[in-house]
Image (cartoon, rainbow, N blue to C red):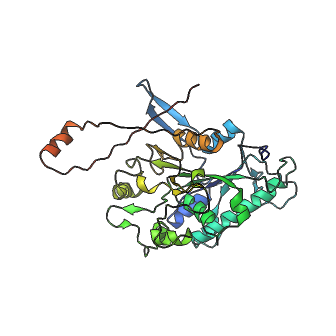
């Protein structure tokens, strides 16, 4: 039996943010040390009693620091990972922001956005640097073989993580082996589909939107061109969690046009059916990665990242010691009177139902 990890389950966490289409969005992104993961939300919500109350969510980073004693790596204006001073001690229970858009910034880089393959290689280098810094801190008492890291990614950030993990040309074996789990918020694992054009066309290069074209995705994910791009290779699919948003109405990008184009069964940008990963278990079974569906939009004040639901799913997956699978059987659905009348009149009706279920394990 192998010796249990002394720091388990609280390994370092690397956050990987999502897509920024324009130069102004990139500059706004890099101006924030935490690239948006520190943003919380204050909204009204209906509690189980039926009462409406104001609810404050501090942000994922603040909650991790308060609930689980994590620390960031910014000290006295320096990034401890980038600092060359020998006295910079990176704690094991640390949070790191992968600032891959710095290279695309006019302030910090060239002003030209690199391809997603370069972002994946940068993640590989960041993991190796973090390993060296963490293992170089004698207080952590961790060897390079024992070092583990969690990846937490939003939207396109999940595709960067998968490109690093799946494509042999983009990541070192030692860096991949260090990844314990991957948690994705609203990642278009099977690309982005729109109401009119279906999958984002490969020729649409504005802002690198073609990163979500399935042909382009197959290339940087290291998959055959005709392969289902939601398939995970080289990493256990059961160690990836997909949090899927189901609320398109609160996604206000482009004045709501993006949400209209994505359709009702989406988070306003990513369709529900495209937000999950699949793969092959060690015993040869085809499996779908663990997942949960929450009534949140792709981003914004009602976004999936800055939500209590997102935080709870993330911490349970990363730190939890027990997995329980459940199945909900729906025997019958009563249609609204108006819908039933349309059917009786011979009209075609298209509809979708979203079920949200809370389960408590007792005993």
284, 201: nearer the viewer: 284
Residue shown at 79%/51% (left/top)? 90
Does 62 sit above or below residue 253?
Answer: above
Does 322 sit above or below residue 350?
Answer: above
71, 170: nearer the viewer: 170
Q: Is residue 15 left or right of residue 187?
A: right
Residue shown at 13%/43% (left/top)? 344
Does 325 sit above or below residue 110?
Answer: above
Residue furthest to the left: 345
In the rendered image, the quadrant that contains the C terminus is top right
Q: Where is residue 39 in the image (x, y as percent from the top left)?
A: 57, 46
The part of the image, by quadrant, that contains residue 204 is bottom left
Tell me if residue 74 can be seen.
Answer: yes
Does 240 sit above or below residue 174?
Answer: above
Residue furthest to the bottom: 203
64, 84: nearer the viewer: 64
Tell me if residue 106 can be seen.
Answer: no
Q: Where is residue 27 in the image (x, y as percent from the top left)?
A: 58, 63
158, 99: nearer the viewer: 158
Residue shown at 48%/47% (left/top)? 303
Q: In this view, does 86 lie to the left or right of 50?
A: right
In the rendered image, the quadrant that contains the N terminus is top right
The part of the image, by quadrant, that contains residue 202 is bottom left
Q: Where is residue 25 in the image (x, y as percent from the top left)?
A: 53, 61
The number of callouts visible is 0
Q: Where is residue 191 in the image (x, y as percent from the top left)?
A: 45, 63
């Amino acid at each position: 039996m192998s010796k249990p990890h002394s720091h388990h389950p609280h390994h370092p966490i690397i956050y990987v943010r999502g897509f920024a289409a324009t130069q102004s969005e990139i500059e706004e992104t890099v101006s924030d040390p935490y690239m948006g993961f520190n943003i919380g939300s204050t909204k009204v919500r209906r509690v189980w009693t039926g009462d409406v109350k104001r609810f404050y969510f501090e942000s994922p980073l603040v909650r991790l620091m308060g609930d689980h004693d994590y620390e960031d790596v910014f000290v006295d204006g320096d990034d401890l990972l980038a600092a060359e001073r020998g006295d910079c001690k990176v704690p094991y229970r640390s949070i790191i922001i992968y600032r891959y858009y710095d290279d695309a910034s006019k302030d910090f880089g060239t002003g030209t956005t690199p391809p997603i393959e370069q972002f994946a290689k940068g993640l590989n280098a960041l993991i190796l640097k973090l390993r060296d810094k963490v293992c170089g801190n004698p207080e952590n008492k961790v060897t390079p073989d024992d070092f583990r890291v969690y990846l937490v990614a939003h939207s396109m950030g999940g595709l960067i993580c998968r490109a690093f993990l799946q494509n042999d040309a983009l990541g070192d074996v030692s860096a991949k082996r260090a990844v314990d789990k991957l948690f994705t918020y609203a990642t278009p694992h099977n690309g982005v589909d729109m109401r009119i054009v279906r999958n984002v066309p490969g020729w649409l290069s504005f802002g690198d939107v073609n990163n979500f074209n399935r042909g382009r995705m197959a290339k940087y994910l290291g998959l055959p061109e005709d392969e289902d791009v939601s398939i995970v290779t080289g990493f256990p699919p059961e160690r990836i969690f997909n949090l899927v948003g189901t609320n398109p109405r609160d996604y206000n990008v482009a004045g709501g046009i993006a949400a209209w184009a994505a359709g009702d069964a989406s988070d306003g940008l990513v369709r529900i059916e495209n937000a999950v990963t699949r793969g092959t278990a060690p015993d040869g079974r085809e499996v779908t990665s663990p997942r949960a569906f929450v009534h949140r939009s792709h981003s914004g004040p009602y976004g999936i990242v800055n939500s209590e639901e997102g935080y709870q799913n993330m911490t349970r997956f990363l730190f939890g010691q027990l997995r329980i699978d459940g199945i909900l059987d729906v025997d019958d659905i009563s249609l609204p009177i108006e819908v039933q009348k349309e059917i009786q009149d011979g009209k075609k009706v298209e509809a979708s139902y979203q079920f949200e279920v809370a389960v408590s394990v007792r005993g």
